[in-house]
Image (cartoon, helix red, strand yellow):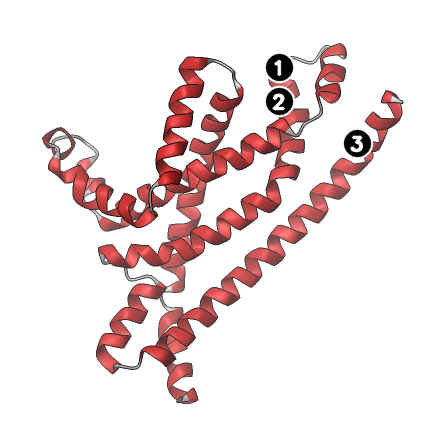
């Protein structure tokens, strides 16, 4: 194994890190917006909202991400209505197809994580807020959502890390992120072991940084919410 070659490959692969992070960040951002809507629909107990949300989550969690990427990249162009719509300039580009597929996929998983966080909020805290005269919007914004975020953060942090690793599938539709550049280097050098060791090291570094960031956020949220939790518990007693 050539250490010098691994180091030079590492430098070449680093050029693809911004695209990988960009794909992951935009996918998580758009996916979060969709996930919040799905989670609220799932907890609404309104059948017309709950059933479509359940179906969406079932479909995207029950099929491989690779299949979803292929369906969006190769399948959407089969519909004349989409080709003639204002969305076609975006949907014909592999970049936006990858982001769309990743966002729709992570939304299905994130919705269940957020829903679990919302359901973990004690009903006593909600009732106490109502007794204080808070509106539903204020209760959601100041009580339910902060507590739900604290509960959901560990699971959501794992989902963000999974999205970073899932961006590797974007190389299938010609995106030159880390795995795409690695595949190109392998075709040029015929040295897959060294190239994938370098690629794996980069993914490990990104995962380590994200893990530490999530741990820091988790600690800060815990410190911020703990005093109010103790006060609530004392009032309840």
Give the residue furthest to the front.
62
* Relative depth, front residue between 165 and 129: 165
* Residue appearing at x 33%, y 46% in the figure: 64
Q: Position of residue 68 (x, y in %)?
A: 29, 43
Q: Position of residue 17 (x, y in %)?
A: 40, 63
Residue bearing mark 2: 140
Q: Residues within 10 Å of mark 2 (few under 14, many from 20)?
A: some
Q: Residue at x 10, y 31 (%)?
A: 80
Return the residue found at the far left.
Answer: 80
* Relative horizontal placement of residue 233, taking residue 20 as reference (left or right): right
On residue 136, which mark appears? 1
How far across and how far down the image is residue 219, in percent?
A: 71, 48
> Distance between the Cα atoms at labels 2 and 3?
16 Å
Quadrant, the C terminus:
top right
Dividing the picture into quarters, in which one does residue 90 lie? Answer: top left
156 relative to 143 in the view: left or right: left
Q: What residue is rendered at 23% in x and 55% in y?
A: 173
Disc 2 from disc 1: Cα separation: 6 Å
Residues at circles 2 and 1 in contact by the CB criterion of under 8 Å: yes
Q: Nearer the viewer, residue 18 or 71?
A: 71
Asked if 105 appears above or below 3 in the picture, the reply is above
228 vs 108, left or right, is right
Position of the N terminus, as image quadrant, is: bottom left
Neighbour tally class for label 1: few under 14, some 14-19, many 20 plus, Cα within 10 Å: few
What residue sits right under mark 3 in the picture?
A: 229
């Amino acid at each position: 194994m050539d250490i010098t070659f691994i180091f030079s490959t590492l430098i070449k692969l680093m050029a693809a890190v911004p695209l990988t992070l960009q794909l992951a960040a935009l996918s998580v951002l758009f996916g979060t917006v969709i996930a919040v809507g799905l989670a609220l629909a799932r907890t609404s107990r309104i059948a017309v909202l709950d059933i479509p949300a359940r179906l969406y989550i079932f479909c995207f969690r029950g099929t491989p991400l690779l299949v979803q990427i292929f369906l969006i990249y190769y399948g959407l162009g089969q519909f004349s209505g989409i080709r003639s719509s204002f969305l076609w300039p975006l949907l014909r580009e592999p970049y936006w197809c990858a982001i769309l597929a990743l966002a729709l996929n992570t939304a299905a998983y994130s919705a269940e994580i957020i829903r679990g966080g919302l359901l973990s909020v004690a009903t006593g805290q909600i009732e106490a807020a109502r007794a204080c005269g808070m509106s539903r919007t204020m209760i959601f914004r100041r009580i339910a959502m902060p507590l739900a975020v604290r509960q959901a953060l560990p699971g959501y942090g794992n989902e963000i890390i999974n999205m970073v690793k899932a961006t590797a599938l974007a190389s299938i539709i010609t995106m030159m992120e880390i795995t795409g550049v690695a595949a190109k280097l392998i075709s040029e050098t015929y040295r897959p072991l060294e190239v994938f060791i370098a690629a794996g090291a980069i993914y490990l570094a990104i995962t380590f940084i994200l893990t530490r960031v999530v741990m820091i956020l988790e600690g800060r949220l815990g410190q911020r919410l703990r005093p109010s939790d103790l006060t609530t518990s004392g009032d309840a007693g």
